[in-house]
Amino acid sequence: MRRNLFAITLLALSLPFTAQVLVHVDPTGIFYVGENALVYNGGGLQTKGSGILDVRGNVMVQGVATDVLKTLDNAGTGDKTDGGNIILRLNDPANHSAAVNPSTYGQLYISGLAQGSVSAVVDKEYRTAKHGTYQQIALPFYNKQLSSLSGTGIGSLGKTFSNVRYSKNEILTWNNATAVSENLNTSSLTPKNTTYYMLGSNGFDSGNPPALMPANSPAPNGSVYTLRGVPYTNGVTEKLVNAANGVNFGATGNAVNSYNERYNSYLQDDWDYPVSPANPWSVATFGRNIYQFGNPYLTNLDLGLVGITESGAVTDNNAISSIQGIRYDPGTVVSLSSGTFSSGAKYVNFTAGNPVPVGDVGLVIKPMQTFVIKLRDNNAEVGTNKTLSFDNLRRFKATPRPNGTGYSVNARPGENAATVKQLGVIALSEDGTELARTYYAVYPTAVTGHTSQPTTQSILGGQNIIGTFEENAVNGGYDMNYINSYWLYINEANETDFFGKAIPLALYNNAIKSLKFEIRENTELVENGTHQLSTGVGFYYKAPNGESVEIKQNQVIPVTADKYSLFYGKPSGVLGTDGVAKPSRTMVVYHQLIDNFVVRFDPNWKTADIQVYDMSGKLILAQKKVAADKDYVLDLAKANSAYIVTAVSEKGEKISSKIVR
C-alpha cells in the first residue's frame, strides 16, 4: 500500500531507544505520514542530513524536558537550519478554503519538551484566502527572523517587507493592552507565541477565488508558500484581563493612539455596536475586553467549548464564563483614506450565564490562523475563568468535539464509530528490553493491498529486525509481487474487506525472545487485558501450531518461530504465512537522490551475484561477488523498460524483483 514499486521512496528509519531520541530518520531516508494518519512518538525525534519526515497526517511528539526535536546536519553534530527535513504538507492546495471538503494538512503536536530542547526547523506549507490589504496570520515559530519572510524563494512569502507604515508592505502586530496595531521592525524576531500579525498585502495575487499566493506563481491552483522555523512547545496561556483598560477612546472614538491614528478609524467592536448604534463609543465596554491572538501551534485549536464548564473528569481547562463572542475569520480587510476595517468575518457568539455558542459554530482554528475573543467584562482579577489555556485546545480533527466527551487531541471512540484500531507488536530481548517494534492499523477507509495512492504506511530498511509485509488484497498473506521490494514498519488494511485475513509478520534476530502487544483505538491505549474494541472485534495472531489466539492489551508471548500472521477479526481458513518461506531483507529499491534503482542487502549477506534481464530474457547486466556492505547501483539508462533483477547470496539465498526504468 505504498507508492508503485517503480517510483518507491526508501525509508531508512532507525530507532535508538535512548532518553532523548525515540525516532531518528537517517540521511536519504523518508518517513512518510499519510493523510489522516496518526504517528505517536513517545520521546525525542530527529532527522539527520537529508533525512525527511514527510507529514500529510498527524504527528504527536510527547516526551519530557530532556527529550529533543532536532534537524541535524550531515555530521550529526550540529543543527541543520535551512529546512526541507520536517515538512507539514497542504494536501490539496486548490481547495485550501473550500466550504465543502477543504484540504487537509499535516499537523505537529509537541508536549513535554523544553523549548531549549527544540531546534528542529519545520517547513509549513501555507495557502489561504487573501484578507484584502493586510493578511491576518499567526507565525508559530520561535525566534524567527522576520526578514526571512521577504524574498521569492522557499521559506519566504514572495515579496519584500519594509518598515514603512501605511505602505501595505509593513509587518504589524496587535497590542491587546493598548488596542493598537504596532509596527514590528523586519530585523526583529517573532516576539511571542500568540502574536497576532497583520502583513501588508502589496504584491500578493488575489487570484480566483482569492488566494494568498505570489503574483508570479507558475501554477496557482497547486502552489503553496513554505514558511520555516522552530516550532513552539506546549505551555502557552494568556490572561484575558485589562484589554484597553484605561485607554481614552474619546467621546466618539476621535482620540488618537501613539501613531496619531483615530481609534474610530480602525477599532471595530461588532459585539457591542448594537447596544447604541448612534454612538457605540458611549457604551462603557465598546472596544474593550477584546483579545486578538494567533494560533501558537502547528495543530488546530478547538475553541468550541471555551465558555462551557464541562462535565466529566477530563476537560480542556477552559471555562471562560464571561465570553461574549469569537471572530475567527477576518473576511476582507479594506484600507481607505478614512481608515481600515474588515467585512465578512465569521463569528461565534455565546449566550450569557452558562454560555451556549450560536452563529458560525464549527470553531476550529487552523495552524497559522488568527482569532479574536470578546469578553463581557474587564475584571482585573485573574482566575481560572480568565485564563485561556492553549494546550488542551489542540485538536487534530477539523470539527469541534461535542460537550461531554472529555478532552483529547484526537477524536475519542465515543465521538466517531469510524475509529482507527492499531496493534503494536514489540520485540523484546530475554531480559525484557525493547529491541524494535512494528504496527498494523485498520479503519473503515484504509486501503487493503498495494496502491499508488498515499496511505498511512511507512517502510523499513534492511537493518530492522521485525516488520510486516504487503498483503495479498484478496486472500491475505504475502503479496508475492512486492515481497522483495519493501516491507513495512506501519501497515494498514481495510477493516471490512480484510476482515479475518492474514498480515505476515517476520522476525530477523535470534535475540528476540518474546513479543508484547500494544492495542490503541484512536491513539488511546485500551485497558489491560482488553481484546474486543468498540466494534466488538479484536486482533488475533496465528501460533506456530496453527491455532488462532486472541490478542489482548499488554499481553506478552514467547517467541517460538520466526514468522507469524496477524489478523483483525478471527481468521477462518486463511493461508496466513503457511508454506511460504520468510522473505529476505535484501530488496531492490528506488533511490530518489541518485534517480536510480539499487540493491539494498540483508545485513547477513556478505557477497552477492547480481543479474539483470530484460523482458525478452536477454542478460543486460551481470556482476559476481558484489560486496554486500553497501548499496549496489543498477546502472540502467532510462528507457521506460521493464527488467527482472536477481540477487544470490554466498549461501545461495535468492531474491527476484521486477522494476521499470
Image (cartoon, rainbow, N blue to C red):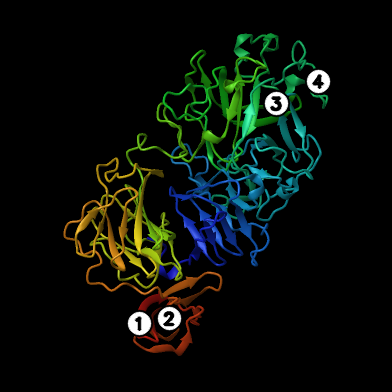
Q: Quadrant of the C terminus?
A: bottom left
Q: What's under tag 3, amino acid-wise? A: Asn
Distance between the alpha carbons at the discs numbered 4 and 3: 16 Å
Quickly name the residue at label 4: 256
Q: Residue at x 70, y 22 (%)?
A: 267
Percent x, y of residue 288 = 68, 18
Q: In the displayed orientation, state which residue is furthest to the left.
A: 573
Quickly name the residue at label 3: 176
Distance between the alpha carbons at the discs numbered 2 and 4: 78 Å
Distance between the alpha carbons at the discs numbered 2 and 3: 65 Å
Left/right placement of residue 447 relative to residue 208 reads left
- The circle on residue 605 is 2
Percent x, y of residue 491 = 37, 58
User: Quarter of the image holding residue 311?
Assistant: top left
Determine the secondary structure under disc 4. Answer: loop
Left/right placement of residue 480 relative to residue 78 reads left
Q: What's under tag 2, amino acid-wise? A: Trp
Front position among marks 4 and 3 = 3
Q: What's under tag 4, amino acid-wise? A: Val
Q: Is tag 1's residue or tag 3's residue first in the polypeptide sequence? A: 3
Determine the secondary structure under disc 2. Answer: loop
Distance between the alpha carbons at the discs numbered 1 and 2: 9 Å
Q: Is residue 307 visible?
A: yes
Distance between the alpha carbons at the discs numbered 4 and 1: 83 Å
Task: State yes or no: discs 1 and 2 in contact (Cβ < 8 Å).
Answer: yes
Q: Residue at x 60, y 12 (%)?
A: 274
Q: Is residue 215 above or below residue 560?
A: above
- The circle on residue 602 is none
Q: Quadrant of the N terminus?
A: bottom left
Quickly name the residue at label 1: 653
